[in-house]
Amino acid sequence: MTGLAQGGTVARQPVQARARARYEAIFKAAAELFAEQGFAGTSVDQILERAGASRGSFYNLWKDKDELAYSVVKESLIMDSITPATPRLQSVVDASILLAVLTPHVTVIKAANRLATEQGKAFFGYLWRTYTPLITELMTQARDLGELQPGVDPGDWAALWIDAWVGLDLRFRETYDDLPAAVHRLNQQMVHAVATAETLASLQISTGRGHELIHNSSHAASYFASVQAQWKDKHRSTPTSAATG
């Protein structure tokens, strides 16, 4: 009986592994296509062709393309990578710059940013609806700890910070490598507007701070794989001194 049970467990493992592989292949293909051409420009057939998957596999996992897109958007969130910092306003800066550093390299984040601005869909606005209360809570804690200037309303400034971030994301989608520097400038303006002098002196707001935080992110593996691939492509296209000589 024990042998049968063990045999059943062993038999299930390859099945589960194949199912997981199918899920990841379809999810990855969808994220790539959503990032490249948006929700409306992407069909289920295109996703399946890129994933090398069957229509049956798709509909066993998701009800439709909308449900798949929603799962892509939810997968992109980065707040679980942000730990409460001192001063608390540092956590707000960290979320902003980490997302900016990850975006050019992590496909699921690029896809989610684009999907969240597609009007008429359930996932429209999902990112700012999710991030705003989280950033508001951090700003409220910062106020209670005496880190903010008098009269700064946590909710208003959290919404303004996120709205400005979304605007920069839209502006730099064709040149995403410039996004981290742009968000750094945004953060500079925001912290000078809301932080006390004492708090301001202790904040780290450089893009380097974002790179330091990558290692704690659930998207770290995707980020480093992308950077490595870009490095290889760059060096393949650069003639060596021997070749040019």
Image: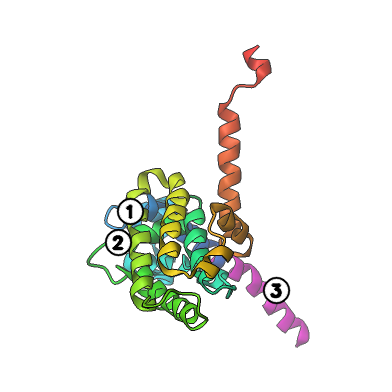
The three-letter amino acid code for the residue at tag 2 is Thr
Numbered badge on residue 170: 1
Pick the residue in front: 225 or 210: 210
Kind of residue sitting beneath label 1:
Leu
Residue 237 can be seen in this image: yes
Decide which of tag 2 and tag 1 comes sooner along the chain. Answer: 2
Mark 2 secondary-structure assignment: loop
Among the 4 quarters of the image, the one containing residue 237:
top right
Q: Residues within 10 Å of mark 1 (few under 14, many from 20)?
A: some
With 40 as the anchor, is 59 left or right in this view?
A: right
Q: Is residue 84 above or below residue 183?
A: below
Instruction: Decide whether residue 17 is among the magenta residues.
Output: yes
Between disc 3 and disc 2, the foreground one is 2
Query: Rounded to the nearest whole Å, what is the CA distance between mark 1 and mark 3?
Result: 48 Å
Q: Are marks 2 and 1 in contact (CB under 8 Å)?
A: yes
- Mark toward the start of the polypeptide (3 vs 2): 3
The magenta segment: 1-19
Mark 3 and mark 2 in contact? Answer it, CB < 8 Å: no
In the rendered structure, the answer to whether residue 212 lies left or right of residue 2 reads left
Q: Secondary structure at mark 3?
A: helix
Q: Which mark is residue 10?
A: 3
Give coordinates of residue 177: x percent, y percent.
Answer: 46, 45
Cα gap from disc 3 to disc 2, whole angstroms: 45 Å
How many numbered marks, from 0 up? 3
* x and y, in percent, of residue 156 in the image: 33, 74
Quickly name the residue at label 2: 117
Q: Give the mark nearer the N terminus: 1 vs 3.
A: 3
Residue closest to the eye, 192 or 56: 192
